[in-house]
Image (tube, rainbow, N blue to C red):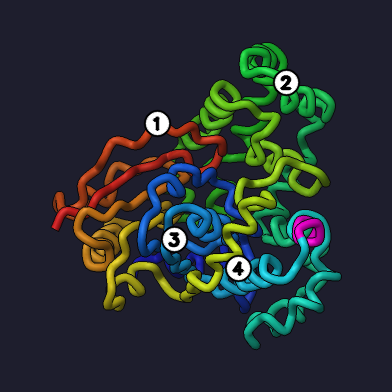
Amino acid sequence: MAETPEVWKKGPLRGHRKQPEIMFGQVREDVALEASLARGSCLCIASGGDTALSLLRSNADEVTAIDVNPAQLYLVELKVAALRRLPYSELIRCMTEDARSSYTPLRDSLGPEAQAFFDARIPALRHGLQTCGKVDGLIAALARLLPFVHRKRTLVELLSQPTIDRQREFYRKRWNTWAWRAGLTLLVNQASLALAYSRRFGMAAGTNFGRYFLSGFDQVFEESPAASNPFVWQVFLSREKNLPLPDWLSEEAGAAIRAKLDRLTLACGDVADVLLSRRSQFDFASLTNILDGADLEYRRILARSLMHGVKDEGLIVIRSFFPSETGLVEASDGRLKRLESPDIVDRSVFCRHVEVLQVRQ
């Protein structure tokens, strides 16, 4: 098997760590597109659980969340327990502020492996389940460098503009300065991605990744109101209180999700292996980050597994950090067809390269 699944088993940034660790406390991609297309039996990457729970809220009949890193599945287990058992105000505090006091009453809802994992990491819950991952800590640390470029009050003013027109004007005139563009490009580049993930990942990103990442900020601030956009607040102020919440964490959504939690299945393993070994097929698949840094061999394996595990005319959404010359369509010898993506505004700056595919047996 190619390197990519190995990269994710214990999580990037792992150094010489021997045990799997939570890398993503939350999914920082806007999965409104995926939720709009979901139907029947659905597959997704578990990560922080937001995608799986968003799909449950949609037209999905059942959701299988897969992750090669078992620590991510333990986190989803804990979030599911919180959704089942906590009143709404305590649920939000557990997710966004401090989950340590909530863990004890939730512990007996977890499997023995998840219990052992969190018993050894209770201090990591102090920032809430949504920001308990290693990448969340890295983003929070990078955000602390922002005062070297813009003052916090300038940021809050940008994120609080009352209309999209005034937001665009503020972004163009006050925020999108040479210092902002130079600073972000300096921090997010091939070298930093190689350090955080793997050398292969950094090489695949290419020398233009910094500019590509910057274009995501341009599009978000030009196209969607920031005041109610949880994804941009998370980037800059992720560990502060009372930020806008992801859609699935609204009180109304929580009630709908709780009614379908028994239809959520968690599976540990590489998604290609799981798809190839599965007897029944999925109607829909949502795969994020799975191609970033993957070589052609793994792309062919994944294309073959999707043709095996997703029904004829079933839909697949592939979301990546950066575009690649060889996608799954090319790796499938034309048996996966690329469709035009629905016109839905993407509110996140992460993983904005999206392809909608359809299986054609």
Q: Position of residue 155 (x, y in %)?
A: 77, 27
Residue 37 or 303: which is nearer the viewer?
37
Residue 12 picture location, percent across and down: 57, 62
Give the residue at mark 4. Answer: 76
- Picture quarter containing residue 142? top right
Q: Which residue is mark 1?
A: 343
Image position of 27 with respect to 342: above or below: below
Q: Which residues are magenta?
A: 88-94
Q: Residue at x 34, y 43 (%)?
A: 355
Along the viewing direction, whichever of 152 and 57 lies nearer the viewer: 57
Give coordinates of residue 332: x percent, y percent. Answer: 19, 55
Type of residue at label 4? Answer: Val
- In front: 254, or 333? 254
- SS class, disc 2: loop
Give the Cα separation between the discs numbered 3 and 1: 21 Å
Q: How many other residues sit within 10 Å of disc 1, few (<14), some (14-19) or many (≥20)?
A: few
**Which one is nearer the viewer's eye here, 41 or 118?**
41
In the image, taking residue 307 as reference, residue 348 lies left or right, namely right
Spatial CA span between label 1 and label 2:
24 Å
Which residue: 67% across, 70% down?
84
Neighbor class of circle 4 (other Cα within 10 Å; few <14, some 14-19, many 20+) is: many
Under mark 1, the amino acid is Asp
State which quadrant residue 240 falls in: top right
Q: Residue at x 56, y 35 (%)?
A: 347
Q: Earlier in the sequence, mark 3 or mark 2?
A: 3
**Secondary structure category for the residue under label 4:** helix
Q: Is residue 140 above or below residue 104?
A: above
Would you say 145 lies left or right of 46 here? right
Residue at (21% x, 51% y) in the render: 336
Residue receiving disc 3:
44
Residue 351: image location, x then y, percent: 49, 44
Which dot marks residue 161? 2
